[in-house]
Image: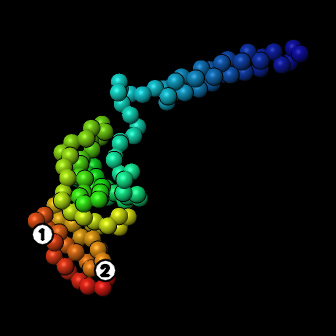
């Protein structure tokens, strides 16, 4: 018993410190950063079934494009999860169809046609894709 006494006090100290750090870390992980902050962003897409959004990062902003029934929902999200520049584009992209976007130009496939939308009108690029 006397030979173990020098190891018991440091071992108990180490155990108390580990438990304290674990509890503090758990408390920090479970705390929300700001009042009203949420980990989810509501998108009203329940009506149209499966949706494949497109995400792009430009100039520190994350651009999100979500195809809906007869329009594409476009918005930007900052690093602090603030939604900015929310707009709808009158364009019908079949969902869950992949599409490509750069600025206000979209390229997608509809009815076996490769279509380019330049922000104003749709142009068929190729047939039977």
Q: Visible in this render: residue 70?
A: yes
Q: Visible in this render: residue 61?
A: no
**Residue in the image at 73% along x and 15% along y:** 9
Q: Quadrant of residue 119?
A: bottom left
Residue position marked by numbered label 2 in the rendering: 112
Q: Quadrant of residue 94?
A: bottom left
Q: Earlier in the sequence, mark 1 or mark 2?
A: 2
Between residues 5 and 102, which one lies in front from this camera angle? 102
> Which class describes the residues within 10 Å of circle 1: few (<14), some (14-19), or many (20+)?
few
Residue sitting at the far right: 1
Looking at the image, residue 2 sits to the left or right of residue 90; the answer is right
Residue sitting at the far front: 47
> Which class describes the residues within 10 Å of circle 2: few (<14), some (14-19), or many (20+)?
few
Q: Are marks 1 and 2 in contact (CB under 8 Å)?
A: no
**Residue in the image at 27% along x and 49% along y:** 62
Element at badge 2?
loop
The x, y position of residue 19, in whole percent, is 63, 22
The x, y position of residue 127, in whole percent, is 26, 85
Between residues 17 and 114, which one lies in front from this camera angle? 114
Between residues 83 and 31, which one lies in front from this camera angle? 83
The C terminus is located in which quarter?
A: bottom left
Whether 25 is drawn above or below 103: the answer is above
The x, y position of residue 51, in whole percent, is 37, 58
Q: Quadrant of residue 32?
A: top left
Residue position marked by numbered label 1 in the rendering: 121
Residue sitting at the far bottom: 128
Whether 2 is drawn above or below 19: the answer is above
CA distance separating discs 1 and 2: 18 Å
Whether 101 is drawn above or below 28: the answer is below
**Residue in the image at 83% along x and 19% along y:** 4
The x, y position of residue 72, in whole percent, is 24, 57
The N terminus is located in which quarter?
A: top right
């Amino acid at each position: 018993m006397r030979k173990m006494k020098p190891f018991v006090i440091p071992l108990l100290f180490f155990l108390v410190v580990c438990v304290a750090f674990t509890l503090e870390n758990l408390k920090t992980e479970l705390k929300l950063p700001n009042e009203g902050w949420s980990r989810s962003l509501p998108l009203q897409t329940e009506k149209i079934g499966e949706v494949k959004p497109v995400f792009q990062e430009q100039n520190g902003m994350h651009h999100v494009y979500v195809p809906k029934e007869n329009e594409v929902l476009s918005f930007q999200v900052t690093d602090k999860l603030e939604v900015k520049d929310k707009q709808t584009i009158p364009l019908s992209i079949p969902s869950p169809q992949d599409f490509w976007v750069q600025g206000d130009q979209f390229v997608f496939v509809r009815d076996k046609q490769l279509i380019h939308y330049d922000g104003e009108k749709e142009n068929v690029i190729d047939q039977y894709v």
